[in-house]
Image (tube, rainbow, N blue to C red):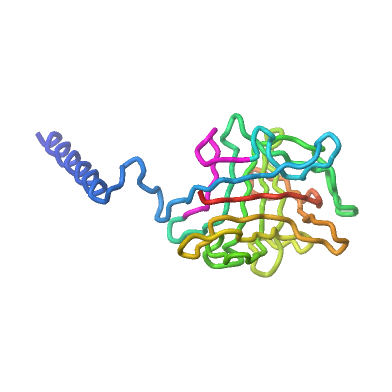
Amino acid sequence: MRIQHCLREATASVAAVILTFAGLGLPVSARPAHGFPDIRVTSILNDTGDVTQSTNYRVQSDTISSSYFDGVDSVSSILHGGLNSASRDWILDTRSSTTRTVLVDLRTPVPNSGAQQIFAWQLVPTRIIAKCHEALSGSFPAIQLNQTVSCPMFVHFIYAGTDYRLVMSSGPGASADYPETNDALVTCTAVDGSNQCIAWTIFPITQADRTVRNVARLQQGSKSGKWTNFGDFYLTFNFNVTNP
């Protein structure tokens, strides 16, 4: 009898929770897993040139499509939420997808940087994050129309079963400060009726020699969490992000 009583209490508790969420107008399956839900965005990794002639962007799409949609082909394309606060950093993650990848090209090492070229170019499962919250409170949505913000960016990919990342992050406020590298430039290109940014471009900086490219540090990961320096590479890219 005691077991039956406990079961009835548990059933009633579950029903109360379901009714609570129903009263909020939220399907139980759509309830946020954390305090601030992610914002779905469309990520566009633009392509250019012929990869066989090395005239392409050094980070670009897999050519299946330049557009990546959140929840399609197991791709995550979001402005990140969070538990206690929302970072609203842009994240594109194809590592769970069996069909979508990102092209990473390492054919432009920085001379005298100790660069170890693990491949020329490959289509690899990749996670890209631009950490604009480190430069601006509110991150991507808080950037004003036509304003450009310098944001640390990480291109994390898997090759031959090993984790690697290309780090573009420098400055006193950066969580990873590699002085020779360059942050990405994120510009707001459109706002909504409440003046919140809903579209962005992401480009490299213009170097002293007038080339538009970033210096990135290649690192190899390990099971211990340590990252080993594999030298520096020049990266070119041209990304668009839109909400929705």
Which residue: 23% across, 49% down? 23
Q: Position of residue 105 (x, y in %)?
A: 78, 41
Q: Position of residue 34 (x, y in %)?
A: 41, 52
Q: Residue furthest left?
A: 1
Q: Residue furthest front?
A: 193
Does residue 68 belong to the magenta stretch? Answer: yes
Q: Is residue 167 left or right of residue 138?
A: right
With respect to residue 199, does 99 lie above or below? Answer: above
Q: Is residue 41 left or right of residue 204?
A: left
With respect to residue 41, does 142 lie above or below? Answer: below
Which residues are drawn in magenta?
67-81
Q: Residue furthest top?
A: 98
Q: Count every numbered label the image shows and give the total.
A: 0
Q: Is residue 5 left or right of residue 225?
A: left
In the picture, residue 209 is in which quadrant?
Answer: bottom right
- Front one among 219 and 127: 127
Q: Position of residue 27 (x, y in %)?
A: 31, 43
With respect to residue 28, does 192 lie above or below? Answer: below
Q: Position of residue 87 (x, y in %)?
A: 52, 59
Does residue 142 belong to the magenta stretch? Answer: no
Q: Residue furthest right?
A: 112
